[in-house]
Image: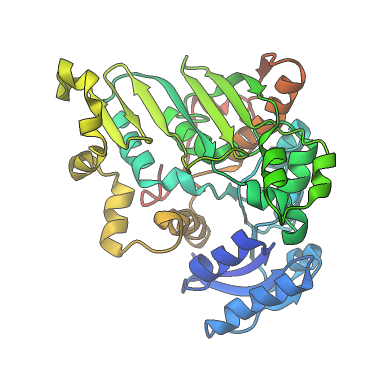
Amino acid sequence: MKEKIKLGMIGFGGRGRGILKDILVPRDTVEVVAVCDVYEDRAKQACDIVTDAGKPAPKIYLDYKEVIADEDVDTVIITTSWENHINLACECMEAGKPVGVEVGGAYSIDDCWKLVRTYERTGTKCMILENCCYGRYELLTTNMVRKGLLGKIVHCSGGYCHDLRDEITFGRENRHYRLRNYLNRNCENYPTHELGPIAKLLGINDGNRMVSLTSTASKAEGLYDYIAQNEKADKSLLDRTFNQGDIVTTVIKCAGGETIVLTLDTTLPRFYSRGFTVRGTRGMYEEATNSVFLERDTTESDHFNWKAHWGNAEEYLKEHEHPIWKDYLEEGVIGGHDGIDWLVYGAFIDAICNDYDFPIDVYDMAAWMAITTLSEESIACGSKPVAIPDFTNGMWIERNKNINPKYAL
């Protein structure tokens, strides 16, 4: 056991700065000893966040290798651009330093296998920091599923439905990696919202696994229209080709017979949603209306007048709140994204300090991130079916894990 981690953090775009300020610096169990970004101004901003909170100034690096080599650093968090996540994570594991990685998709299946094999060779733990796994209603639904209230689960859906047109089209000015990805790739580029909580609910890599997918992309029109209508937008982008389709739909088949539909919807005007939906033989949960429909609790007239029951998931919290959230509400909800950032980083830090297994481990990380490159292959080949590798090499059938019940999903 250790009282605190000595943290080196790499990557300080908006996400990295927010996590540092709101989630890491306030914790007594974290000492930020090194910060790093390829842009010197961002690295200095990160240092200022730490010192402004009255903490000792961390060392500033512009080369991530110096963070990993720093003997004062015993744990690393990576919040860089997507394409760097796996290579940096592997270098951390090679150096014997547990590593937490912000979410994104993989660029090749070889990279996903590299991630798994590096962990298996070094024994150094790696966790993908998927905050949605700790969403209150995702966990409410998971708890109800495990109590049998929704019956046998047949289908789940979700996605990343978030208008990012400003962030993408002003990528040059904001030094944001999404622009180059949307110009050059066409795939489910951000799969772990909402695949993470769905995978945990369905027992993926823990008695179940994903076996195949098909993926289909619409045409790309949203960004062109946005640039044309926005006076401040870089008009030279109108002469470029955006490869990323406006809507990407991915259908996954699981070994247990369940299906999962993921939707990427980030370049058309819309409200934010993760679209989390779970369908079972005795009922369902739907995020869009935040409602629970249980066959036992409804009448025939409810089927046609369901609007009156929108928001009724609040009622089910009274009896079926997940234990994680019961404890969290008593302690006090903290941090961004309705408190889920605090929970996922708490799980990461707790596992290191108290020598638990990560609740979201390297096999989860490889399987979830692989969806990006597999969807890219499927789309490029006319939505053909693509096999999803078993990164556990058969261990998914039965796994023994030592996870702190406080954070067990």
How many numbered discs? 0
Residue pictured at 55% horizontal, 40% vertical:
269
Please state if 291 lies on the left or on the right of 188 as rendered: left
Q: Is residue 378 left or right of residue 18?
A: right
Q: Nearer the viewer, residue 374 or 114?
A: 374
x, y (%) of residue 27? 47, 71
Q: Is residue 357 visible?
A: no
Which residue is nearer to you in this view: 273 or 195?
273
Residue drawn at x 65%, y 32% as measured from the top left: 246
Nearest the viewer among 104 and 288 is: 288
Measured as percent of width and height from the top left, residue 74 is found at 64, 66
Q: Position of residue 68 (x, y in %)?
A: 74, 63
Q: Looking at the image, which residue is at 54% across and 28% down?
A: 262
User: Is residue 190 visible in this depiction of the protein?
Assistant: yes
Please state, as top left, top right, bottom left or bottom right, where the C terminus lies in the image.
top left
- On the image, which quarter does residue 34 sit in? bottom right
**Could you tell me residue 315's position as x and y percent?**
19, 41
257 vs 313: above or below: above
Side of 54 relative to 226 (left or right): left
